[in-house]
Image (tube, rainbow, N blue to C red):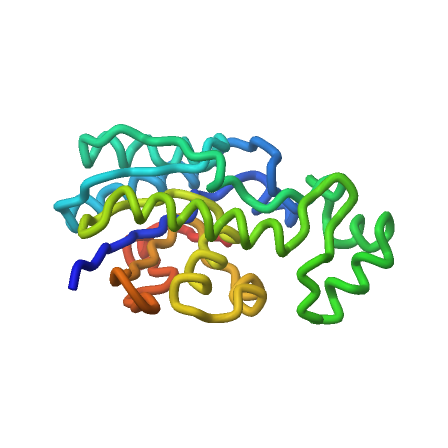
Amino acid sequence: MLETTVFLVRHGQTPSNNQGLLNGRNDTPLTPLGHAQAERAAERLAELRPLHALYSSPLRRARETAEPIAQRLNLPVQLHEGLTEFNFGLAEGLTLEEVRERFPAIFARVMSGANDLDLRFPEGESAREFYERVDRTIREILAAHRGQRIVIVSHGGVIGAAIALLIGDDPVRWSRNPLPNASITELVVPEHGPARLLIAGDTHHLDTLEVQI
């Protein structure tokens, strides 16, 4: 059976991570620690060669994480718009307290824990639209690299959704389990049927760094 191995890498730390802000489409850079995390992730992935393709979200924090990986692996970074993070609309860049104050009804629905796929912030996308976008994007990338070993650098929400969709689990549940910055997740995806999740959110390559989620 032809199988594809996928390594999902979350971007390194950003100022928004430190400040507890909703950071979907805001194009924030990495912090100095985030750059160090990206270098460590690149070193770890270099140990896992052969690797045949490297994709990234076009947002800056993902691109800055992908750049040292590209250098280590001698692969071009292929940017894909479908790998961008969830669009929080007018809630972008707000703290949870600010979200509660400005959008109390939506905040209450979010905090209720209900599986509400049609929930959206003004000018943002719904959970359903997000999951459908991630599913289309991951399937497209997999179709282009069947039987290969590929790296995808993206965001916590995208990676959580991708894991759930590939293994046949509930993406909403996975979205509530954030993955650490610069963590590496490994899945093996067969031509048919659910993927096998081998490693989720591994950060052993960051052991000597001060990791902050």
| Residue at far left of view | 50
Q: Image check: 172 left or right of 58?
A: right
Q: Nearer the viewer, residue 80 or 203?
A: 80
39 and 159: which one is in front?
Answer: 159
In the image, taking residue 189 as reference, residue 25 lies left or right, namely: right
Q: Is residue 95 above or below residue 200?
A: above
Do we see residue 8 in this rendering? Answer: yes
Q: 77 and 101: which one is in front?
A: 77
Horizontal and vertical percent position of residue 7: 30, 52
Give the percent coordinates (x, y) of residue 83: 47, 42
- Label count reads 0
* Residue positioned most to the front: 192
Q: Position of residue 194 (x, y in %)?
A: 34, 68
What residue lies at 58% left-to-right and 50% top-to-bottom? Answer: 130
Q: Tell me residue 69's x, y (percent).
A: 27, 37
Residue 42 located left or right of residue 123? left
Q: Quadrant of the N terminus?
A: bottom left
Q: Residue at x 48, y 30 (%)?
A: 60
Q: What residue is shown at x 35% (from left), y 51% (from top)?
A: 8
x 38%, y 50%: residue = 139
Confirm whether residue 188 shows in the render: no
